[in-house]
Amino acid sequence: MSGTVLVTGASRGIGKSTALLLSQSGYSVAVNYLNSADAANDIAEYINSHGGRAGAFKADVSEPDEVERMFSEIRLSLGEVTALVNNAGIAEQRVFSDISSSQWERMLAVHLTGAFNCSKEALKDMIRRKSGSIVNISSMWGQTGGSCEVHYSAAKAGIIGLTKALAKEVAPSSITVNCVAPGIIATDMMSGFSSEDKENMCADIPLGRLGTPDEVAHAVKFLLSESARYITGQVLAVNGGLVI
Ligand code: NAP
């Protein structure tokens, strides 16, 4: 694999694993973050000191101006973005009647508008080059709906719709757009759940355990690879059999 990949929300969790795996596969990696500057810089330094090429880039993906600036900075230091992983996300458990308008809007802004903003910037160069790949990180809750996560589920379902529609639109430019829908993955996002909660979750998962960020990263890597050039508009589930 070659070129430059932008992984949004790459300071922790699934994004971090994806950034590290893609750097090992030959990509120059733009590590996007919002608050975790030290963590993002450490990841970029680690990659640079292990024979790869990376930089850390701060931007709130929900803000179009910040995203545009980030793409200019990446172009200058790592070259044009040839692959994009829309991964940045937030989670919140709340009964529907307690979700405020601002919480609803923030959830959609980070996940859905974030993917819109970054895809729009990335496609400027991809369409001119007539090549490129985008992988959006949805969730099994975007496929099935999660109780007490209506705003999260709506945002993640929106990402699946965005993926399918955009895949059709940019296919004539040989650009693929796919989705990975993780199940329950052991990251900071799960830190609000007790050990007992997690044991109960594992009991429901056919493969009997939570997924790892690395297992999601491998699915992303496959969808960005040459082996997946004829796959577009698809949702690849990484969920241990929880949703089949
Ligand atoms: P995580 O460990 O909580 O990490 C979230 C990442 O997103 C961090 O790097 C954070 O950056 C970044 N981020 C949040 N808001 C941002 C914004 N507005 N702009 C830029 N970056 C932002 O989460 P994770 O579990 O790895 O989840 C990654 C993705 O997978 C998310 O889209 C999530 O919805 C999805 N997912 C996760 C699971 C799971 O079980 N963990 C399951 C299904 C889907 P800072 O730290 O710099 O703020």
Image (tube, rainbow, N blue to C red):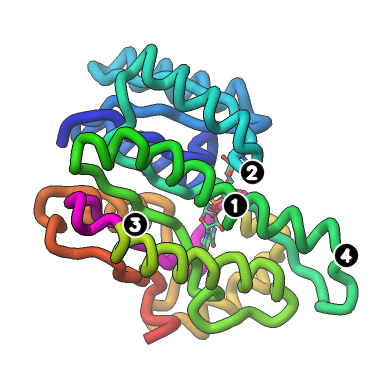
Question: Along the polypeptide, which appears first: circle 2 or circle 3?
Answer: 2
Q: Residues within 10 Å of mark 1 (few under 14, many from 20)?
A: many
Q: Point out the stretch of residues depicted in magenta.
A: 170-188
In this view, the residue in front, 109 or 52, is 109
Q: Quadrant of the C terminus?
A: bottom left
Q: Is residue 128 above or below residue 107?
A: above
| Relative image position of residue 69 (x, y in whole percent) | 54, 23
In percent of the image, x 64 and y 43: which residue is there? 62
In percent of the image, x 22 and y 29: which residue is there? 3
Q: Quadrant of residue 128?
A: top left
Dot 4 falls on a residue whose secondary structure is loop
Labelled pair 1, 4 in contact (Cβ < 8 Å): no
Labelled pair 2, 3 in contact (Cβ < 8 Å): no
In this view, the residue in front, 134 or 8, is 134
Q: Is residue 238 magenta?
A: no
| Relative image position of residue 207 (x, y in whole percent) | 37, 78
Labelled pair 3, 1 in contact (Cβ < 8 Å): no
Dot 1 falls on a residue whose secondary structure is helix
- Residue at label 1? 113
- Residue at label 4? 100
Q: Is residue 19 above or below residue 101?
A: above
Labelled pair 1, 2 in contact (Cβ < 8 Å): yes
| Relative image position of residue 180 (x, y in whole percent) | 38, 63
Q: What type is the residue that disc 1 sits on? A: Thr
- Residue at label 2? 62
For residue 215, the mark is 3
How far apart marks 1 and 2 lie (CA) works out to 6 Å
Dot 2 falls on a residue whose secondary structure is loop
| Relative image position of residue 131 (x, y in whole percent) | 19, 42
Question: Along the polypeptide, which appears first: circle 4 or circle 2?
Answer: 2
